[in-house]
Amino acid sequence: MELKQLRSFVAVSEAGSLLQASARLHVAQPALGQQIVALEHHLGAQLFERSSRGMALTAAGTLFLEHAKVVLADAERARLAVRESIGVPQGEVAIGLPTTAALVATLPILGACRDRLPRVRLKLVEGYSGFVQEWLQSGRLDLALLYGEAPEAGLLKQPLLDDRLVLVTSATNTRMPRRLTLQALPQWPLVLPGREHGLRRLIDDACAPLGVVLDVVAEIESLGSVKRAAEAGIGSTILPAGAVAEDVAAGRLRTATIDSPAMMRRVVRATSLTRPQTVAVAAVNALVVDVLREMTRSAAWPARWVGPSDAPRGEAPPAAGPAKGRAPHRPARGG
């Protein structure tokens, strides 16, 4: 199996026909068709359904496409690693961010990368934390921010900060206390994500042992819409303090601390144990730690820093081991 065959396969799958793929690759159509046939023979499976309308992936082809993209991405990383070893960090680095982390960290990470690593092209992917973890494990991402430090197959996790959940209401709500207990939450009509969302599961798990039943008046999967509903006074919500710090500073929302150690999430930086890092990935890894540490110091992300102290710029700090006595991990789809 050759990289040329994989590139041809991916091009045909994306173009949907040999004619269009041959034009894109600047390869004669008969030669391209022979490469596809040779690849199918090597794999012992038909990858495409041929018809007058073009070429469509079979079930085997769809499965093989994901693997082919990973192999080609690894080959590109290897090429860039050699080039970068004699120069400055450059190339693409893919970072995964859960939705609530993306709300606060996306722009600071982008800005710092443009300033310190101008030849690195960031690809930031936002999604539910469970999906982000799967994408990292499958090789689609180079690093990610995740919640929880429980061991995961093939991943190295470095604890960075503890992100506290707070009650969030409209800034016009003058009866909002500065602190309240979990038992007081049912007094507040809430707009929350659905029950399968990781954030909602954490909230429900914190309330269940105390028999606290929340007054959820609406469920909204978009956290941006959740914030807008709170701002409009439709209901209060519960979000990480960092996700609403800018809104609070701008006078759109106000928050109250919830007195419960269960209303806290540990944010970790995760990387793959099985995939070598390029120079660019290592530089972005160190940059992410620097940016989040500075954000907690300046209260731009109002959280408790538990990560490494200052390290020389460009040097990745050592990983911290998992804390003892923490609750067992459950994979979550929420962000």
Image: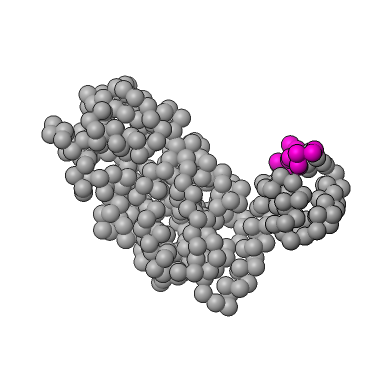
The residue shown at (34%, 35%) is 225
Q: Which residues are magenta?
A: 51-62
Query: Which image quarter: residue 185?
Result: top left
- Choose between 289 and 150: the one closer to the eye: 289
Residue 58 in the magenta stretch? The answer is: yes
Q: In the visual, does 211 lie left or right of 252?
A: right
In this picture, is 135 found above or below 110?
above
Residue 110 in the magenta stretch? The answer is: no
Is residue 47 something that shows in the picture?
Answer: yes
Q: Which quadrant of the rendered structure holds the C terminus?
A: top left
Q: Position of residue 272 (x, y in %)?
A: 57, 54
Q: Position of residue 113 (x, y in %)?
A: 42, 64
Q: In the visual, does 58 lie left or right of 130?
A: right
Q: Position of residue 118 (x, y in %)?
A: 45, 69
Q: Which quadrant of the rendered structure holds the N terminus?
A: bottom right
Q: Position of residue 263 (x, y in %)?
A: 32, 37
The residue shown at (13%, 31%) is 175
Q: How many marks?
A: 0
In this picture, is 327 found above or below 91?
above
